[in-house]
Image (cartoon, rainbow, N blue to C red):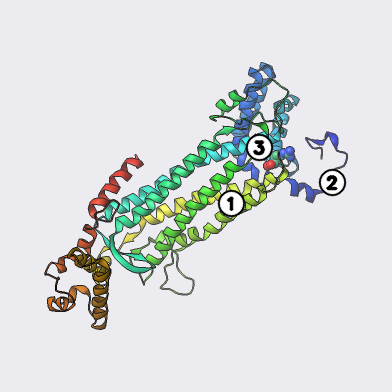
Amino acid sequence: MKKLWGGRFTGFGDKWIEEFNASIQFDKELVFEDIKGSLAHAKMLAKQGILTNEEFQLIEGGLKTLQTKAENNELEFYLQYEDIHLNLEKQLTELIGPVGGKLHTARSRNDQVATDVHLYVVRNIDELIEKVTGLQKALFNIASDNIYTIIPGYTHLQRAQPISYAHHFMAYFWMLERDKNRLVDCKKRANISPLGSGALAGTTFNIDNAFTASTLGFDGNYENSIDGVSDRDFVLELLSGLCIMQMHLSRLCEEIILWSSNEFNFIELDDTYSTGSSIMPQKKNPDVAELVRGKTGRVYGNLISLLTTMKGLPLAYNKDMQEDKEPLFDSVQTMQNCLFALTGCIATAKVKKEELAVKVSEDFSNATEVADYLASKGIPFREAHEITGKIVLYCIQNNKFLKDMTMDEYLSFDNNFKEDIYEVIKPEVAVERRNSLGGTSFEQVKLQLEKAEKLLK
Ligand code: ARG
């Protein structure tokens, strides 16, 4: 089979090696980016007089036909044409004749593929931002519905202090806000055009790089053609950002899994986001949350994979860099899926408000209130802590909670206790009184929600 780059070669043969070299199996994902890049390049060539107007019309028409075919899923791709760039060029030439071969004037596959990947990254950042916002909205809605729902807050997975359910979920909202900002940042650096770098050294033709850049919606051009074709740091930056975001999702999923268990019983997942067991009829498994947590592995792996591929590559392009695509596509697709699945899972989960109300009234997560109470009477906090610890131990030994202690019992530990202690240790009062900036008080939570709402608009 004659190759598009076959001039210098005499023997072609091995099918297996051909397949090993090829990237069309996965880089067909770039079909629209590649056509878009070619259209801009052809337009520039015509503007510069490198293509005649007639040649340009033919090429443009051909590319648009290919685009329509691609949209209708009618384009076929062939392994022997190696990659998306050569597949499209081949089909263009079949459509419009040898003039199709003029499209590649003043261009190399090296700057072509770099352009495609930049366009792909930028487009997907926009889509990812939209999906993150969707998840944030789901979190925001649950929080708005549950300002006054109180749950035990945890440290070390041990009950620590009562908090507003809304406060807990809004913590994830702000994590996602930073994740989103990381994407926005990444886009600033990714949105520059390598087109015109040629193979590595630029081109002898009188091209207009700024024109192709602006036609493609880029903010500018690479300052250095070698950098333009050699670099994949914009991909790595996206993959790093996705790792951090996936880590956040995984933590949220871990809580969904715990919270929907019998042991916690904080929430009930909708049937859509759960599955049964093939043997145990009582089971309702949180599969979707588990899968999102599980997919964190491949997202981390993709980053390490590309970091390792790029490490030690001499400038400029090396075929190793063809290995950038699968990790990139996989992480982007995985992230999109996870964000989508989790949004539905969260939005449809039922919060077990009655059960939660019982839980917080039957634990020691209000012990800090007793210590703070004594400290506010002038007792050094360390001592107040010690006294409260003894009270908790006494309660445990006598099978009661702080609310069940009589006034005499309190007074036997310290004579600063007054009747108002019973008010102070109520979970809702404990929450309400944590009114420091960013704290869990209802007032602070409402402030958070107001800020969040503005961001969502
Ligand atoms: N399929 C190649 C890649 O993805 C395109 C660039 C090939 N360039 C070359 N000189 N062989 O990296």
Q: Which residue is at the front of the view, 130 or 350?
A: 130
- Disc 3 under 8 Å from ligand 1? The reply is yes
Circle 1 SS class: helix
Q: Which residue bears the numbered disc 1?
A: 303
Q: CA distance from mark 2 to mark 1?
A: 35 Å
- Above or below, comparing residue 265 to residue 448 in the picture: below
Of marks 2 and 3, which one's residue comes earlier in the chain? 2
Circle 2 SS class: loop
Question: In the figure, residue 266 lies in which quadrant?
Answer: bottom left
Q: Which residue bears the numbered disc 2?
A: 13
- Above or below, comparing residue 173 to residue 410 in the picture: above
Q: Looking at the rendered structure, which numbered label has been put on residue 125?
A: none
| Residue 382 shown left or right of residue 8 in the figure | left
Q: Which residue bears the numbered disc 3?
A: 113
Alpha-carbon neighbours of circle 1 within 10 Å: few (<14), some, or many (≥20)?
A: many
Which mark is in front, 2 or 1?
A: 1
